[in-house]
Amino acid sequence: MTWHVVLEVRRDGPEPLGAQIADQLRRQVEQGRLAPRSRLPSSRQLAEDLRVSRSVVVEAYEKLTGEGLLESVRGSGTRVAAHADTRIRKPVVLVDRTVPPARFNLLPGTPNAVTFPHREWTSSYQRAVETARYQGLGYPPLLGVDQLRTELISYLGRVRGVLGHPDNTMVTGGFAHGLGLICAALVELGVHRLAVEDPSHDRQRQFIEENGIRTVAVPVGAEGVEIEPLYASGVRAVLVTPSHQFPLGVPMSQQRKQELVRWAQDTGGWIIEDDYDGGLWLDHRGRHLAMQPVSPERIIYAGTASKLLAPGLRLGWLVLPPELTRVTEMVRVRRDLGGDGLMQLAFADFLRSGLLDGHLRRMRTRYRAQHGTLMQALERYLPAATLVGPVAGLHVFATLPESADEERLVARALARSVLVKGGRVFYDRPGTALPGLVLGYTAMGRSGISEAIRRIGEAYEE
């Protein structure tokens, strides 16, 4: 198909033809006349339309690609970058947070919607609808449909090393839903305080408090959550992210895992393992499996499809110690009547067919390339930043010099239409933490990543 765009060039003007073409295209993008992902004519076609040399058009396209406004997609030609959206939007309320509009989204944990395997998921869902019996169309079991729990245990054992049984596995509406059920179950067992890592997800701490359990911040060191403060706190439950600590990204050492299990055995405590992006370890060297197999009787394993596929699916799972399964079921019967049976059957098919394995293999390749682009951009535009942790997950933590004004830097980045989070907001006492940035790098193309970091670098230099 031949695509068309209206441009005018003047051969009698002082400005070179290539600069005229680039200026007009840039203006059309900034004015919103060329929408994100709009296809542009090939360089050969546009040169023919404007009666100019093809090299003139190539020069203009390359200039705008370097600025992050255009992107070249193999097999699809040149198009306006997905993030080049200048339309004024109302702020979006997301999980009780107000997310301001910005062209460049570097928030952590944001998968790229373009990469969702639409065709494969549609096939699995269609097979689920065609083969659904009572479990798919009636009220599902509170633990979830049998087929999905069976496939989950098989998949988690094979990929994450998890030990469990379908009868002790519960399908939830995402991690937050599962965490709410766990909080209620702990209260039933007389547990009213929960230790959380410091730093950890700020919204998660608030969510736990709203579910009737007080949080106690325990510092994270180079090997993971510190054990002495955990003993000193007197708590009987702790929430950890051992494979890829959020937000620092560091994995928990094997020795620290053993010490944490010993704490649980000594105190009769419970360990909640949030394996939020465990399937997205990007470097095979030093890959970390789940912690749960070390002590299946004391560890509650929690996973989610939000980072692996899309948060809109609202699919999560808990592998529970046998002692907790019944009480968690009784809590759930007072809250809801189970999840979407057809969705669960579709996900069971997606797992059984190996489609999730294939999707994650593609995503790991893509994310490694994006991670490499991020590192190159930081070296070039923000050399003062130092990355923490291995190549894994959907974000990295970058520390900044102690003299850096993190809050001001985040604000100035937003003024340049870059949405990024500072590291201090994740600490229990933000004023005591070193400045840093939590950089999500999967929601944009590589040209967008480079341009976003360039703008942050400009803000930092100011």
Image (cartoon, grey):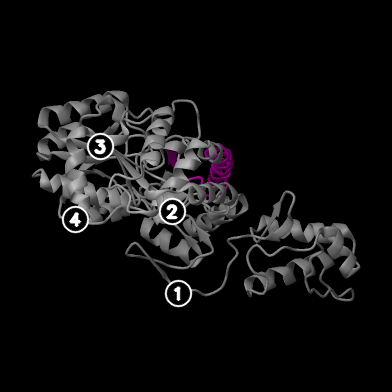
The residue that disc 3 covers is 320
The residue that disc 4 covers is 334
Q: What is the CA distance from the residue labelled 1 to the residue labelled 3?
A: 41 Å
Type of amino acid at the residue the image marks with label 3: Leu
Q: What is the CA distance from the residue labelled 3 to the residue labelled 2?
A: 22 Å
- Residue 443 against residue 361 in the figure, above or below: below
Residue at left offset 82%, top offset 59%: 43
Type of amino acid at the residue the image marks with label 4: Arg
The residue that disc 1 covers is 90
Type of amino acid at the residue the image marks with label 2: Leu
Please tell me how crowded label 1 is: few (under 14), some (14-19), or many (20+) other residues with Cα within 10 Å: few
Which sits earlier in the primary sequence, circle 2 or circle 1?
1
Asked if one can make out residue 170 in the rendered structure from this viewpoint, the answer is yes
Q: What is the CA distance from the residue labelled 4 to the residue labelled 3?
A: 19 Å
Region in magenta: 360-388
Q: What is the CA distance from the residue labelled 4 to the residue labelled 2?
A: 23 Å
Which sits earlier in the primary sequence, circle 4 or circle 3?
3
